[in-house]
């Protein structure tokens, strides 16, 4: 036991004899103030509401609630609480060197009407038992999801099925844009495109901006549904994805579409064309 009143042995010598650092002796436990506790409670509430927000956006939410803090402090408190925003990624665009690659056709192209350009991409969705793969076909003019498929493997079959369904339900587009993944350069996928007389466009490797609209779709799906629902089975996942895409097409307003829904945007061109013809 260190005695600060001992005149024979200084604090330094007493600490040395006991084998402890002087800083340990002088350290005082800092008790959290009420403001810190309130901020931590609010951060937990915000995390449940917005699990996809990082510390910067959480800081802005706190500011809206009139809780004075700093981004640095919010980051520290989130770390102490074990809060991590949700943003898993998995590499799904694996090229096959034996398959042909086609040039990129969208540079400088203005997309002016539905079915002018479709885009497709693959993402993965995590389940408790593993993960599955999801492909979607999107009309770039309206951002409408035309078809989708879930698969347990990364073969090309589910991509081909989604493409055939989109063509069957919505007609033939002028161009289909994909990345250079082996599913989209496969013989089966390319033959469907060529058989329908569709021009083939492929992104340059690593050019993530070329599929940004589909990437935004994945982000919206995951943050607004998948991560919040935590589906346990493939069947539950398919029902949830189907429900979300119906909402996405019919009800979800898009700022980039002047707050129209994809369905409204897709149909608006037909209405406008009919009015001009009349």
Image (cartoon, grey):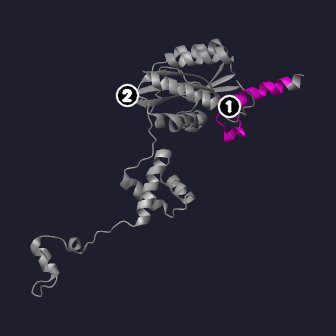
Which residue is at 44% across, 65% downward? 35
Q: Quadrant of residue 203?
A: top right
Closer to the camera, 87 or 101? Answer: 87
Closer to the camera, 166 or 263? Answer: 263
Residue highlighted by disc 1: 262
Above or below — where is 12 with respect to 46? below
Q: Which of the numbered marks, if any, corresponds to residue 130? A: 2
**In the image: residue 84, left or right of residue 218:** left
Q: Is residue 145 shown in magenta?
A: no
Q: Quadrant of residue 212?
A: top right
Above or below — where is 50 with respect to 269? below
Closer to the camera, 194 or 138? Answer: 138
The answer to whether the residues at label 1 and label 2 have Cβ atoms under 8 Å apart is: no
Which residue is at 74% across, 26% downward? 267
Cα gap from disc 1 to disc 2, whole angstroms = 32 Å
Q: Is residue 264 shown in magenta?
A: yes
- Which segment is the magenta one? 250-274
Main SS, magenta region, reads: helix
* x then y, percent, for residue 110: 73, 34
**In the image: residue 239, left or right of residue 128:** right
Which residue is at 63% across, 11% downward? 195
């Amino acid at each position: 036991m260190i005695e600060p009143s001992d005149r024979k042995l200084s604090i330094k010598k007493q600490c040395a004899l006991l084998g402890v650092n002087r800083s340990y002796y002088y350290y005082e436990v800092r008790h959290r103030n009420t403001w810190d506790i309130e901020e931590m409670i609010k951060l937990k509430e915000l995390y449940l509401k917005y699990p996809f927000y990082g510390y910067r956006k959480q800081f802005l939410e706190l500011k809206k609630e009139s809780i004075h803090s700093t981004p640095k402090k919010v980051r520290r408190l989130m770390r102490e609480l074990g809060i991590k925003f949700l943003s898993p990624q998995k590499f799904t665009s694996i090229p096959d060197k034996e398959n042909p690659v086609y040039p990129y056709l969208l540079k400088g192209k203005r997309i002016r009407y539905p079915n002018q350009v479709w885009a497709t991409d693959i993402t993965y969705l995590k389940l408790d038992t593993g993960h599955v793969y999801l492909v979607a076909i999107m009309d770039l003019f309206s951002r409408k999801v035309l078809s989708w498929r879930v698969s347990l493997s990364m073969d090309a079959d589910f991509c081909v099925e989604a493409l055939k369904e989109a063509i069957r339900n919505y007609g033939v587009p002028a161009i289909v844009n994909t990345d250079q993944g082996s599913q989209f350069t496969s013989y089966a996928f390319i033959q469907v495109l060529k058989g329908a007389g569709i021009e083939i466009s492929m992104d340059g490797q690593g050019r993530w901006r070329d599929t940004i609209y589909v990437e935004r779709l994945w982000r919206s799906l995951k943050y607004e549904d998948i991560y919040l629902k935590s589906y346990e089975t493939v069947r539950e996942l398919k029902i949830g994805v189907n429900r979300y895409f119906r909402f996405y097409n019919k009800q979800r307003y898009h700022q980039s579409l002047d707050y129209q829904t994809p369905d409204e945007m897709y149909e608006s061109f037909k209405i406008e064309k009919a009015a001009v013809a009349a």
